[in-house]
Image (cartoon, grey):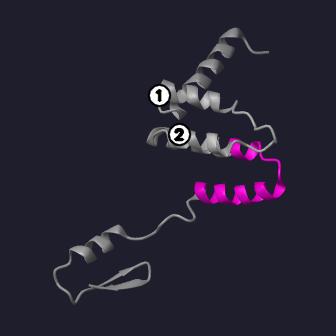
Amino acid sequence: MLTPQELNEISQNKIKRRNQKSGDNPKILIIAQVLKFIPTSRDGDPIDFELKVFLVLNKQSSAVLQKQVYKQALIYEIDKNKLTKKRIFLWKKLLRVDSDSKDYYAFRDKVNCQDKNITFEDDGEVYQA
């Protein structure tokens, strides 16, 4: 059996973790708590558009709420085909598998190059300046 002091300590630790996850921003903390209660639509499909709005509020909300929004999108999906497609898409987003891997600095050097006989290579692509 836990004592009241231990229960209080557990509660305080939980509050600290929530605050750290929200970047110590009380507005983001409130949004994160409310996000759990976004309902499904009448026909059972999740309201992905409304969940996506949370990701485009600002840069901080996108970084903090991304995993939770993706989790909510998966929880309320009923159709197995849509769920499989959505799961693959969201895992790629989380793992950044399809991210753009172009080398900005090589491209910048190509654009800023004064000597026209220089060749640049970027991810296997060869550029002639």
Q: Does 37 sit above or below residue 123?
A: above
In the rendered image, the residue lying farthest to the bottom is: 117
Which residues are drawn in magenta?
A: 72-94
Residue drawn at point x = 75 percent, y = 15 percent: 2
Q: Is residue 92 magenta?
A: yes
Dot 1 amino acid type: Asn
Q: Is residue 57 magenta?
A: no
Residue 3 drawn at (x, y percent): 72, 11
Residue drawn at point x = 47 percent, y = 28 percent: 24
**Magenta highlight: main SS:** helix
Residue 52 drawn at (x, y percent): 59, 44
Quarter of the figure that contains the C terminus: bottom left
Quarter of the figure that contains the N terminus: top right
Using a 10 Å C-alpha cutoff, classify the residue at mark 1 as few (fewer than 14 neighbours), some (14 to 19) or many (20 or more): few
**In the image: residue 125, left or right of residue 85:** left
Residue marked by disc 1: 25
Disc 2 element: helix
**In the image: residue 102, left or right of residue 42:** left
Using a 10 Å C-alpha cutoff, classify the residue at mark 2 as few (fewer than 14 neighbours), some (14 to 19) or many (20 or more): some
Residue drawn at point x = 73 percent, y = 43 percent: 46
Of the residues under marks 1 and 2, which one precedes in the sequence?
A: 1
Residue marked by disc 2: 64
Q: Are marks 1 and 2 in contact (CB under 8 Å)?
A: yes
Residue 22 drawn at (x, y percent): 52, 32
Q: Does 105 sit above or below residue 68?
A: below
Dot 2 amino acid type: Val
Residue drawn at point x = 73 percent, y = 60 percent: 85
